[in-house]
Amino acid sequence: MPPDFRKIVFGLVIFLILVTLPLWTNLLRGTAPLEDPEISTRDVPGKDRCVREAEYMKANHMDLLNEWRETVVRDGERGFVTVDGRHFDRSLDRTCMDCHNKQEVFCDRCHNALAVSPYCWDCHIGARETKDGSTALR
Amino acid sequence: MSQGKLKPEELARINYQPPAKGWMDPDVEFRKGTWCYGAVPDTLKYLDLPLPKKWQPSDADWQLPPNWKQIIFEGMRERLQRFRTFKVFMDICVRCGACADKCHFYIGSGDPKNMPVLRAELLRSVYRREFTKAGKIMGKMVGARDLDEKVLKEWFYYFYQCTECRRCSVYCPYGIDTAEITMMGRELLNLLGLSIEWVNTPLANCFRTGNHLGIQPHGFKDSLDFAADELSDLTGVPIKVPINEKGHEILFVTPSADYFASPHYFTLLGYLALFHEIGLDYTFSSFASEGGNFGLFHSHEMIKRLNAKIYAEARRLGVKWILGGECGHMWRVLHQYMDTMNGPADFLQMPKSPLTGTVFNNAASTKMVHISEFTADLIRHGKLKLDPSRNDHWKATFHDSCNPARCMGLFEEPRYIMRRVMNHYYEMPEDTIREQTFCCGSGSGLGTDENMENRLRGGLPRANAVKHVRDSKGANILICMCAIDKATLPPLLEYWVPGMEVGGVHELVGNALVMKGEKERDTDLRGQPLVKPAKEVQDAA
Amino acid sequence: MLEKALYGDRKYWTWLAALGAVGLMGVLFYFYQFANGLTVTGLSRDVTWGFYIAQFTFLVGVAASAVMVVLPYYLHHYKAFGKMAILGEFLAISAVLMCMLFIFADMGQPFRIMNMFLHPTLHSMMFWDTIALSGYLVLNVVISRATLSAERKGLPPAGWVKPLIYLSIPWAVSIHTVTAFLYAGLAARPFWMTAILAPRFLASAFASGPSLLILLALILRRVANYDVGKEAIQKLAVIVAYAMSVNVFFVLMEIFTAAYSNIPEHLLHFEYLFFGLEGKSALVPWMWTSEILAVLTLILLINPKTRAKEGLLGLACAMVFVAIWIDKGMGMVVTGFVPSTMGLVNEYFPTLPEIGITLGIYALGALLVSLLYKIALGVRRSLV
Amino acid sequence: MTFGFSLFVVALLIAIPALGAAAGGHAFWGVVIPYAALAIFLAGFTARILGWARVPVPFRIPTAGGQQKSLDWIKSSRLDNPHSAWGTIGRMALEILCFRSLFRNTRVELREGPKLAYGSSKWLWAAALAFHYAFLVVFLRHFKYFVEPTPAWVTAIQGLDGFFQVGLPVLYVTDALLLGAVAFLLGRRLLDARVRYISHAADYFPLLLIAAIAVTGVLMRYFFKVDLLGVKQLAVGLLSLQPVVPEGVGAMFFVHLFLVSSLIVYLPFSKLMHLGGVFLSPTRNLPNDNRMRRHVNPWNYPVKVHTYEEYEEEFHEVMKAAGLPLDKEKSCPKAS
Amino acid sequence: MDRRLFVKLTGLGALGLAARPALDLFAAAEIPAHSPLAQRRWAMVMDLRKCQEAGDCEVCIAACHQAHNVPKMDRPDEEIKWVWKESFHHTFHDQEHPYLDEQLRHGPVLVTCNHCENPPCVRVCPTQATWKRDDGIVMMDWHRCIGCRYCIVGCPYGSRSFNWQDPRKHLAEPHKDFPTRTKGVVEKCTLCEERLTRNQLPACVEACPAGALVFGDLGDPDSPVRELLKSRYTLRRKPNLGTQPQVYYIV
């Protein structure tokens, strides 16, 4: 074998380790469980179902929220009527978080798992629970 | 020379638009002026090379043996196992095209197959077909094609249109060196006895007589004695040249053209003057009377066969180290191959300048020093008395020869010398010098006459840069450190830049060197009258 | 051509490293500001724009001043500016980039800076200023690259460059005019609401920029052995002399209008600048320094004998630069806020992080100028 | 035609999983295919590197890109023409991290005269750099799907990449750069006659494939949303050797995954091996110290040479006549 | 509450609730022929005498700031103010003279955003993060504001505040129904547009114990604001600038 064969093999091994790094990390360190979000709906009279079907919301909630904020802030239109004729207030705080009142298990669980950090909560207070049960600011 | 009819402005009308049809279907026409004559059987026989035959590339029938493809594939397989360069360079080219307009032959001809990438693809396409799975399955789509006689002819045509100058390699993001590929291509062609006369005849000469020109020992001695006499006449200092003498400190090896050809000869006079003046303890060798090595243009084996004599002669003569003269491909061999092929040179000693005491650590293993390193060191230490005004009739620019440039990086030493032995030195445009230097267009055994059109085309970028300095600074001489340059640049410049002379670094050193006991010089080494300084002219009047 | 910036001696690399270090310090201060908000600056409810915006305004002038060499060279074929034109263009590029960095540093929400382009607002002068500056940057980059690379190749510049050069001339005037419009159109701020603001900006720009260019040319002659030529420097000195005269004249016009009309809203700002209000007088010594320097420079520059002496000229140029920097980089912006729209007199003092970021941006600008000049000089030197 | 062929193949590589995943068999598309691809990639890559590594480097032939190391008072170019190990490492680092050689690129122009002019030409360098670095960042960003919890450095890279709040979800600068650079590289191959002439289908194909990967990625991010939690469950499952196939991951994802699998399968058998090859190029990874240190050719073999003895034998007479020293005094033939 | 106003607010709220959901093309709701906002022109009349009778004005300020999560900053020069007290001198210094009624001169003047008819802040904003709604409210979009503070520079009334630092740290009891702001954006009074849609009067108006603040629609000739403007002489701040403030002061 050429004199630099070992050097090259060493480099190759480094490369192979690097490209399979996630595999080693997962095997050696284990992975945290990836749980589905908890809907955590509390019973709100007249609000038994979400404004859109779950599948849509799961994938596109950010678009809906974006649309809502544009409509509310810029057009001053707050009322939202669902396909099946139910009326809602276009409001993250007063509509979404009213039902989905456990932000940690509803919003944060997925966002954390997917390393998404929406800037909603820079201004909107959300519904994080603290030890004393009061709403807390981040 | 049919191309002789073409005026420079006609030859410079170059079409860079590639043809609409792709390049994969070979269609090579051996147009007069673009190719070199085939090797004659005698020289091949003398060197024990395979398949000698009377043959010309323009023949329809190349008299190939029936198993010629097998020979080629075997040859490829063997080389793929021997040269990592070859294997890696066959595999990793991404065809980015950065090399395309770096080749002087492409710039001068517009022939797209002179783009280094395509020159290599000629070989790669066959490699893919025979040696890679993708090529076997996907064929043309991955750039693979079958070897046939047309492909072989194309190889011959284009591998003898590459001067192995390595300019493209400087720009390649993966360092792919077309010289390596051309060398492989030529080795493969040699397996079928397909070589050119201009390479093989010097090879045979060199093998027999020790030098490419076939000068026998007495002729060699005559010519050095003649040079010594002429130098004595010019300087008034009696000069003697030691040849084949044992017990000297240094063996001096230089290309054989220096003894006979012009303007090489004036550089030889420069060496002799310098060695005499500093009292160097040295000897020439008639057996190692050639530094150059046309084996480089033939095959690795032939490099080794010709190169062996230098160390052998150094050992026989019992010198301490070796000094090498101005030459291009000679230095490529000495720098990159000699020690590996014919070393170790452990019978020699660490090169050390007897005058300055400088130890040439950069030659610690080969024990061979370049004359410009040696002279630059002398000048640096004030060991030479120089009168730069004796070169005032010259306005010089410097051509970095490809091999010392891109194989060694020998840039500053000659410049340092020139700036101190003359007053009028100018650089060519920066994209055409140092590591970006352009080839003379005639290197690697292509400096013959039958391919003159191609030489003129390939030399266009170099000549054009020279023209630029001539026009902007009035330069009248192109200095170079390579025997092939000195031989091939004069006709090139005569065509593109009439009025330019060609000279060597040590010719200028010889002009400027004030020797002990010399008579007042009124001519340079060429016998041309010196320009008197204005003040002296006034005084004389 | 970029590679020209990569070959230099130890002095060159030390200089770059020093500028880089100051730049890095600025970046670190910026991280601090980024994390804590603009509260780390000396800005407040009443003085909402300060050092950053003032430096921006000043540097727009420096950028615009390139036209003072470009116009004579390209439009009037004034050959003496041959070695100066590229210096002017490269200075303009660096100045515009510094302007952009200052704006960025001043943003409350820097990640939303693209909103400028996502929601273009034709009635906002700030939008137009963004367009003007970005356009000017692009023009200068394209023009200087095209001309320098043609020069390197020994060929005349491509045909399409000429119209761009002609376009760049009014464009240079426009960047400082539109920058003046940022201020001059505000009913809320009588100090700025003057029709003479844009001309005044231009006059001060054509004094400060060329004086910086003269200083740079003098420095380059010393440190880089690059001589733009005596004639070029003298011609530029005349330009500085005229521009500075006009600038001082305009300032006097402003003071007359405010003082003679005696409208408090106008007068109070000048009072604050030169005498202080309600015992607050941070800018007073600076402004008097600026005015005294202005008078001295006029004496040195208008007198042909003193102007011809390059030592004195250099001094005068440094003084012009400082005088105008105080005027625009300190007085101009802040005074618009003192007294405030409510009549409150609250002063502004830049804080350490603010000064750190400002120095950092200037250092990065100087770094860029050094690199670009190195390229330009390298290309010129390589020509045979 | 070569371009059309590549386009067709990429279209096929999109259509197969699109139709296949729609028909079901997510375990096949989500588990079998990626595992197979990864295995082929690792084995193929290793085989290629070892294949090169086994071949010796008989001669040291570095390309000198600057002044050699010779006399002490001449400044040598330590990075462009290194003579030491560290210099060589520096040269390789510049080559691999900054594309140093491509940075030298020029473009020649022939004008009347004739006059040849060389212009600085950095576009290819800039686009190549943008392409490779954007690709690297995009790849590193994907680590958020590979491990749980997401490493902090991934979040940091992602935060910087999406610093400017443009669009929702936020636009990544590297996404735009990657697509832009691919477009440039493809456009150059198609529009520059010279580059078009040298291009094979094998040159268009990887660009188109990478473009398709990037486009499907962008589409999933903005237009055809997939269940990302499911994606992560699948990816983490794969990469912890406990494959799971969550329900409801959209077909677009399987297309993306299949294209990525195709790319890594293709890589070891194509020019994309320049990824490994650039490290092994003997003109770059060797110091230019030929005369200082001896380089050994493992297969050096003896050759037939012409010895001095043979030479003196042949030219004995003339040498003697010329008065040149001789090693052997031949018995002179009797004077006639 | 004034009955007519109540009816109006109710109508507006109902229309708002019933308005077209922009997301859903198949929504059942009817799209009104034109936006009702265009017919409104909200304005406020402040009776300074009543203000001063009522005491220190802190009630209405607190009501507003509480409703909108306006923080209480430590440093006075970083104060965020939607509605606040000023001296007559600073509010009307162009209309001040030595012989002014002492009570007026020394009493507080309640100031807020004037919701100008011709707002300079809107003109200068480079991103349309602030704009004038059809009903006259000069509105802000805190999602879009880039924090350049040009609007503050352009406002002749000092009505705008900038979040020099994170406001959340300075909120004692954040109020979940209204978002806070983030650092680096400008904010100001929005005339309680969120309350208007819910048929509520602006917080300050509702809170003032003396009824010194009267809110209404200038588009309605019979509205109380029109009544007041007809019957009483009113001042506006810096009328010479042509901004046409919609906050009127009865002195």
Image: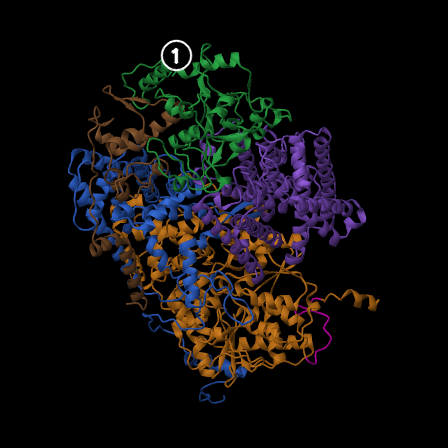
Front one among C50 and D308:
C50
Q: Which chain letter goes with mark 1?
A: E
Q: Where is residue B346 in the image (x, y as percent from the top left)?
A: 41, 80
Residue in the image at 36% along x and 29% along y: A69
> Which segment did they paint magenta?
B516-528
Chain letter matching colour green = E
Q: Chain B is drawn in which colour?
A: orange
Q: Where is residue E131 in the image (x, y as percent from the top left)?
A: 47, 25
User: Position of D258 compared to C162: left or right?
Assistant: left
Whether residue C203 is situated above or below residue B393 in the rendered picture: above
Q: Colour of chain C?
A: purple
Whether residue B17 is situated above or below residue E191 in the rendered picture: below
Main SS, magenta region, reads: loop
Front one among C274 and C15:
C274
Chain letter matching colour brown = A
Q: Chain D is drawn in which colour?
A: blue
State the residue position of label 1.
E4
Q: In which quarter of the image is residue B207?
A: bottom left
Q: Is residue B262 visible?
A: no
Front one among E73 and A14:
E73
Question: In the rendered picture of this protein, how many numbered marks are placed on residues?
Answer: 1
